[in-house]
Image (cartoon, rainbow, N blue to C red):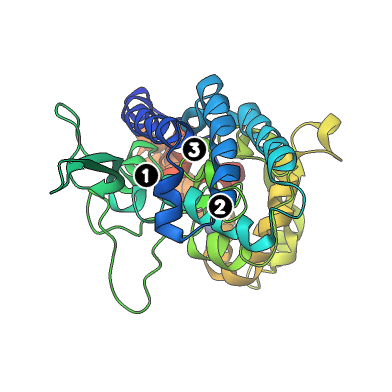
Amino acid sequence: MQKLIIPAYALRQHRLLSDSIKKILEWLASGNALYLSSRASYSIKLSRTLLQYFKQLYALYKKVDFLLADIKQMSAIIEEEEKIRNTICSGKKWSEEDEKQLNGILVRIFGYDEGFSKSKYIHLETKPLSNGGERTSIVYSDEWPKGNNSWGAGKYLRALRIRYCAYCNAESVSAFDDINGHLVSGDYSHHTAFDHFYEKTKYPFLALTLRNLVPACFRCNTMIRNAKPLNKQCLNPYDGSFDELVSFKYDKKTVEEYYWKYDPKHLLLESRNPLLTNNNPAIVLNDEFRILDCYKTLYDVEIGEFYRKLIWYNRHQLDGTFTSFPQLSGSIGRKFFLGVTFNKCDINLHRFGKLFLDFL
Ligand SMILES: [Zn+2]
């Protein structure tokens, strides 16, 4: 809900992965058709097409660092990649099945599930063969280059200082047992704490791009995102702050009337900028992830309780308390009694942090 800021050390760590992937693309682009065809039994013809593709993708990667790309660069990469596919891969020589296989290769190179979520380092490894030759292959390993700590989804999540979903601010994003990003186990665990703003099935080459990895809860990441593609007008949490674009409101007068019977319909979301009313990316985000509906139906108890505290402590309780404890008067006292003691910059660490601060 607050804009996600990537700390410098996360960028440094990610650059290492980026350099490694660049080397893999360079290697694929420099004539390693045999590697591809031996792995997936491609025809030589298809391998040649793939080589053309990787040559151009590598040229693009040299211009824009995919893994560290900013928001505008991500859309530019998508456009450029589409152009590459259209010019090289169009026509009958490139079937739907071939597309699928190409995506399979990209998924392996930009391996979020196999590599980043397990803190594994992807790189090229060359081993000698018994006949005197050598064989190079793409491998994942626990070994990180000397002088570098391991790096992966668990560490990135902590670097972002976020505990609750960047979309809904209601459910936890922690799906990890420890700081190394090891995953929780068990039948009901969900194994992904990051949503890919641009789906990784459609855009596998952006699977590891930091600004494409939005910490999200199971509801938003799996249930909502799997149902349909995201409206591209939706705010990317790395691009702006939901908090600054919109605010949660409640109708004070009506709420007082309904003191004992909280009715969630009084909860509203308003654009902070009147010029943005029809084109506010945070409103689009709200619609896409049905945040207001979710607050009204799933969390009416928690939010209702907060409503009542606001009214009760304002009307009856605080004046007397402040006479005895003048140090608690004013906003400090209200925060103390309402249980909201954090600052705006810590919204992402608190459940309903945005809504509670808006109501204060
Ligand atoms: Zn969520």
Amino acid beneath label 3: Thr
Q: Is residue 31 above or below residue 154?
A: above
Q: Nearer the viewer, mark 1 or mark 3?
A: 3
Q: Secondary structure at mark 3?
A: loop
Foreground of the two, 199 or 23: 23
Ranked by sequence position, the earlier of labels 1 and 2 is: 2
* Numbered label attached to residue 209: 3
Q: How many other residues sit within 10 Å of disc 3, few (<14), some (14-19) or many (≥20)?
A: many
| Quadrant into which the C terminus falls | top right
Q: Secondary structure at mark 2?
A: helix
Residue that carries the numbered disc 1 in the rendered image: 157
Foreground of the two, 231 or 202: 202
Residue placed at 29% from the left, 53% from the top?
Answer: 118
* Numbered label attached to residue 110: none
Residue 220 placement: quadrant: bottom right
Residue 242, horizontal then vertical, whole percent: 63, 39
Q: CA distance from mark 2 to mark 3?
A: 19 Å
* Numbered label attached to residue 102: 2
Residue 358, horizontal then vertical, whole percent: 60, 42
Residue 43, horizontal then vertical, whole percent: 54, 56
Residue 274, horizontal then vertical, whole percent: 84, 32
Q: Is residue 359 left or right of residue 336?
A: right
Specify whether residue 73 is in view: yes
Q: Is residue 88 above or below residue 154?
A: above
Q: Is residue 290 above or below residue 329?
A: below
